Amino acid sequence: MQDTARRVLNTDHPFAVRRFHTDGKAIWMETAEATGDRRLVDLTDGNGAMLQVLERSFRKSVTFDGAEGIANLWRPSADQPRVVLDPQRRFGRPIDDETGVPTEILADALRAEGGNVERVAALWEVPAEAVEQAAEFELRMHKRLAA
């Protein structure tokens, strides 16, 4: 799948360009139909979807570089707006946007501290909201991976 995407789009980082989208479960590539309609094709199973239907949520969560159309920031969940993936910070791992602390670290610390949000926030010098959102995000990711 990745080799095909590299070849079609002529780039080493095909999943970072504006033509790709994700809903957290599938990877979609934007195509132009012969009729001029823009559609999304699921690269995992080849099924299509109307771009306009899915575009609203995708476009709101990803920020693209204006010159090259490369993704430079992704907020994967509206429920955890502090959580971002930024290729320029922490190698693109999920982090708290304000502090830069990886979500995995905060979630692990919360487990180690028996769920004491305030203690973890104090230890890591981050707002309690950062700990809560990081833990919620990591829990959601683990559930998706287990499904």
Image (cartoon, grey):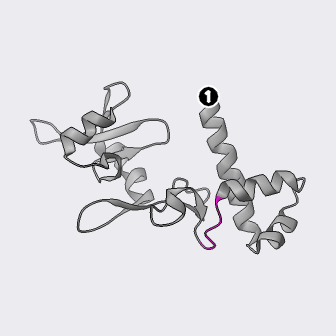
The quarter holding residue 128 reads bottom right
Q: Is residue 90 magenta?
A: no
Note whether 138 is above or below 33 in the view shown.
below
> Is disc 1 placed on a helix, strand or loop?
loop
Q: Residue at x 68, y 59 (%)?
A: 133
Residue 38 visible: no
> Mark 1 highlights which residue?
147
68 to the left or right of 108: left
Q: Extreme left residue here?
A: 34
Note whether 121 is above or below 5 in the view shown.
below
What percent of the width, then of the height, locates residue 136?
70, 51
Q: Main secondary structure of the magenta part?
A: loop
Q: Residue at x 29, y 53 (%)?
A: 18
102 to the left or right of 23: right
Question: In the rendered structure, which segment of residues is drawn in magenta?
Answer: 98-102
Q: Residues within 10 Å of mark 1 (few under 14, many from 20)?
A: few
Amino acid, disc 1: Ala
What percent of the width, then of the height, locates residue 17?
30, 53
For this rendering, which residue is in front, 33 or 5? 5
